Image (tube, rainbow, N blue to C red):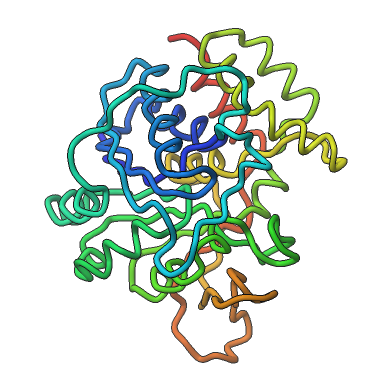
Amino acid sequence: MRRFLIDTDTASDDAVAIVMALRAPDVKVEALTVVAGNVALDQAVQNALYTVEVCGASVPVYRGLDKPIMRPLENAADIHGADGMGDCGLALSGRTPAEGRAVDVIVDTILGSPGEITLVCLGPLSNIAAALLRAPEIADAVGRVVIMGGTGVHGPGNVSAMAEYNFWADPEAASLVTKSGMPLEFVGWDISISSAIKTPDRYATLEAIDTPLSRFAIDVSKAVKRFADEHGMDGDDLPDPIAMAHAIDPSVSEVSRLHVNVMFGDGGQRGVLEIDRMGFIGGEPNVDIVTHYPSDHFFDMLFVSLRDD
């Protein structure tokens, strides 16, 4: 069994990605660590606990940072709904997370099993940056680090002209992580809009599955679907699930290894990837950037995870 540790700011697409991991037959999810991002931390924790419960799983959920490491939180409730889960009426309160702090769990899990842990990051990188500041040695001890974040291989951004939300929300954390020496794999928002859009045909297939998990996946995405419809997209996209698909099955990914920085501060450069394709910066390649993930393969994986056994 492969061992995953998932860091999440649990909203609609995070929840679907978590379902994919919990349903993967050869993956053991060690824990969910939660960070503020799409919604405030307390809501994100409740959303994670609900998702684990829906899957009938027994996985601890830990509270992490309630804001970025150097700035206030700016959430994405306008995209995912006030509760982050499509405002579809789920009972997203009253559950109790595990005792302990997410940053400690990240450090202890990685150092306790050197080379064995795949860290999958679905939200702003605040928890990961804090873990690196506490224990820089985790950079050499972690097996893989798959990050849903950034854009720039194909463009555009989803929160500014060139920036993706997770890196924009906490650009200082994203910059620190990118420079840490961790074995990084970025799956950007551009891969989601090229390979993970629920077109009408795919939406119909999802409806036809008609299981509790498929209905859950539809319900939590209702706010995102409305946003996509209002903005003339072919359907709502699934950035965190396609990042999880790459984490589970990277064999079909097309990847470029490049030198990357994440720009911080404020203004138009905030959270933007600086990708050195021509060697102008002179740094060694530090990130494997996914440049393509086959759409059919992704949706096959998604649909299988939502069907009954």
Report the side of 22 relative to 91 (left or right): left
- Residue shown at 46%/23% (left/top)? 92
Asked whether 41 or 174 is in front, the reply is 41
Residue 94 lies, with reference to residue 162, above or below; the image says above
Tell me the quarter of the picture where residue 68 sits: bottom left
Residue placed at 63% from the left, 37% from the top? 80
Residue at the (32%, 49%) spot, across then down: 64
Residue 212 to residue 24: above or below: above
Residue furthest toward the left?
112
Question: What percent of the width, then of the height, locates residue 153?
Answer: 66, 65
Q: Nearer the viewer, residue 273 or 28?
A: 273
Position in image of residue 259 (x %, y %): 51, 78
Instruction: Name the side, left or right, on which 106 lies relative to 11.
Output: left
| Quadrant of the frame with the C terminus | top left
Quadrant in which the N terminus appears: top left
Give the percent coordinates (x, y) of residue 90: 52, 18
| Image position of 18 with respect to 64: above or below | above
Task: Compare residues 53 and 4 and report the one nearer the observer.
Answer: 53
